[in-house]
């Protein structure tokens, strides 16, 4: 399903770009699944990255919204 069918009014995306991104993401997920022996390592890494991003971006968003 193309992005313009999912989000009406969005700019059109070429089929080549859409398919290359889709297959690229699938290849990355497959390589991670083959390379990492335990799913818990991936989950802990994703959780730590998400917490770090939220730890940095939430105060910045609050400062930008309300000012110093």
Image: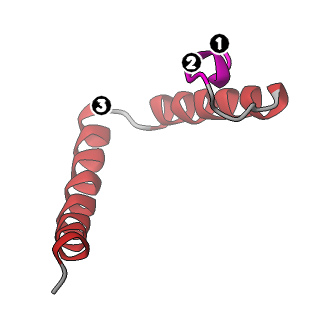
Q: What's the magenta region? A: 1-8
Residue at 69%, 27% in the rendered image? 23
Instruction: Kindly indicate the quadrant of the structure image that contains residue 28.
Output: top right
First in residue order: circle 2 vs circle 1: 1
First in residue order: circle 3 vs circle 2: 2
Q: Which residue is mark 2?
A: 6
Q: Which of the image's four quarters has the N terminus?
A: top right
6 sits left or right of 58 in the view: right
Residue 2 sits above or below residue 39 on the image: above
Mark 2 and mark 1 residues within 8 Å of each other at the beta carbon: yes
Disc nearest the viewer among 3 and 2:
2
Q: Position of residue 15 (x, y in %)?
A: 81, 25
Under circle 2, the secondary element is helix
- Estimate how packed mark 2 is, as few (under 14), some (14 to 19) or many (20 or more) residues with alpha carbons within 10 Å: few
- Estimate how packed mark 1 is, as few (under 14), some (14 to 19) or many (20 or more) residues with alpha carbons within 10 Å: few
Distance, label 1 to label 3, CA atoms, is: 29 Å
- Front-lying residue, 50 or 28: 50
**Disc ID at residue 39:** 3
Q: Which residue is mark 1?
A: 1
16 sits left or right of 43 in the view: right
Q: Position of residue 60 (x, y in %)?
A: 24, 73
Distance, label 2 to label 1, CA atoms, is: 7 Å
Under circle 1, the secondary element is loop
First in residue order: circle 1 vs circle 3: 1
Mark 3 and mark 2 residues within 8 Å of each other at the beta carbon: no
């Amino acid at each position: 399903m193309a992005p313009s069918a999912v989000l009406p009014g969005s700019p059109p995306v070429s089929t080549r770009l859409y398919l290359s991104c889709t297959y690229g993401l699938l290849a990355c997920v497959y390589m991670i699944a083959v390379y990492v022996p335990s799913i818990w390592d991936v989950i802990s890494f994703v959780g730590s990255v998400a917490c770090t991003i939220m730890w940095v971006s939430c105060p910045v968003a609050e400062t930008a919204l309300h000012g110093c």
